[in-house]
Amino acid sequence: MKEANSDDLFRLVGEISEKISQIPQGAEILQKAVRGEISQETAVEEIFSLLLKASSSDGSGLLEEIRVASSGALAPLVGEEPSLLVRDSSNKEVINPLWEAALAERLSLDGDAPEFRFGPLPEGAKPAPYVFLQTLNPVVAGFMLERASQKVLGLIQEERKEHKRVCERVLEETERKSIASGSDLEVSLQTARKFLPEAPLGVPGYLAGKIPDFWVVDPPEGKDLLLLSKEESQRYSYQALATTQGRVSISRVLEAELVQRLQNSGIQVSQGKPSGKIILQKAWASVVYGEKDLSEDFNYIEVVLNEFLNEILQKASSGKEYLLEVKPYNGVYTRTFGWEIIFGGIN
């Protein structure tokens, strides 16, 4: 069994960077990695070494937090959830390759996973913010997801430019003072570089080590949709279903619309996780490998909505109070995507 890929593990560590800092030497390793004093691979090796050597009151709890935090977005969701750690042929604990593969797959689909890294957005990566939606049209949803990604990227690029300007000013001032005083220029510049401000980790609402916020962007106008080619419509529809940001964003509008339609049918229901007996727990999911697997005019959101609505109406009774929760179904490893409903009573 091969050992875990360092780049993938680095992103995984990012989700609990604050927890890692509680371990002796953990905070120091994180700071060195952010400042670029050690490589990502070295940081990952040192951090996981600390986790594995820590006492059960520290390390075991943190490894469990990694597993729990990762399961929702990365678990294959078929059969039993795989263990985060497994032992190789030499009895050494390594990250389960299934988790590795699922994380790599998620990154290839979403473009970025800010909660799984603690450094700046990598060059060429595409931000993956959640979006406030009020549409049941997957093409519109995908269009807005891309618009939000571009908005966040623009803000991050401005932060990078400002950071570069600040660093250049500091080094220019250092050079000027060094020449004026006759001190060693190279030594002065090396010292100044150690104290340069850290590279920005994102922008408010989209920061490394944190789950992204929901962003507000304008929906497309009618003319924008009319100008879309078949291929563009398929791509937007696919992005709304196949990306984590798409499924999470649609979960909210699905939940709100389901509650509204149930209330219109005389069912007393509110949004929220059921605190009483679970009446219905059901998932709708589809295996999707690429954009061409979805027709540009197939509205799977309406299909999901009507299927869930009919199922709930068969189980619900008028006069009782219920809670309804809609969650994304994240079968990243198997490319099985969709949503899950949990419908139940109130204690």
Image: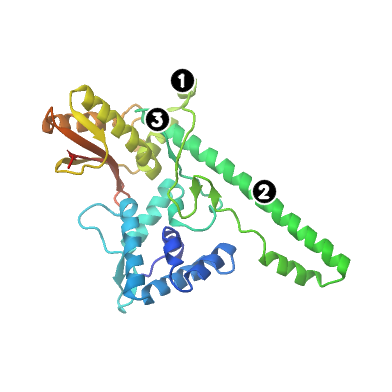
Q: SS of the residue at dot 1? A: helix
Q: Which mark is in front, 1 or 2?
A: 2
Crowding near pointer 3: few (<14 within 10 Å), some, many (20+)?
many
* Residue type pointed to by label 2: Glu
* Residue type pointed to by label 3: Val
Coloring applied to the structure: rainbow
Q: Which residue is mark 1?
A: 222
Q: Which residue is mark 3?
A: 139
N-terminal of the two: label 3 or label 2? 3
Residue drawn where x is 33% and y is 31% of the image: 295
Could you tell me how far apart the alpha carbons at marks 3 and 1 are, in whole angstroms? 12 Å
Q: Is residue 31 above or below residue 147?
A: below
Q: Nearer the viewer, residue 57 or 233?
A: 57
| Whether residue 291 can be seen here | no
* Residue 229 occupies quadrant: top left
N-terminal of the two: label 1 or label 2? 2
Residue drawn where x is 75% and y is 55% of the image: 169
* Residue type pointed to by label 1: Gly
Q: SS of the residue at dot 3? A: helix
* Residue 158 occupies quadrant: top right
Q: Nearer the viewer, residue 83 or 210?
A: 210
Q: Is residue 96 left or right of residue 193?
A: left
Residue 65 appears at what percent x and percent y? 34, 61
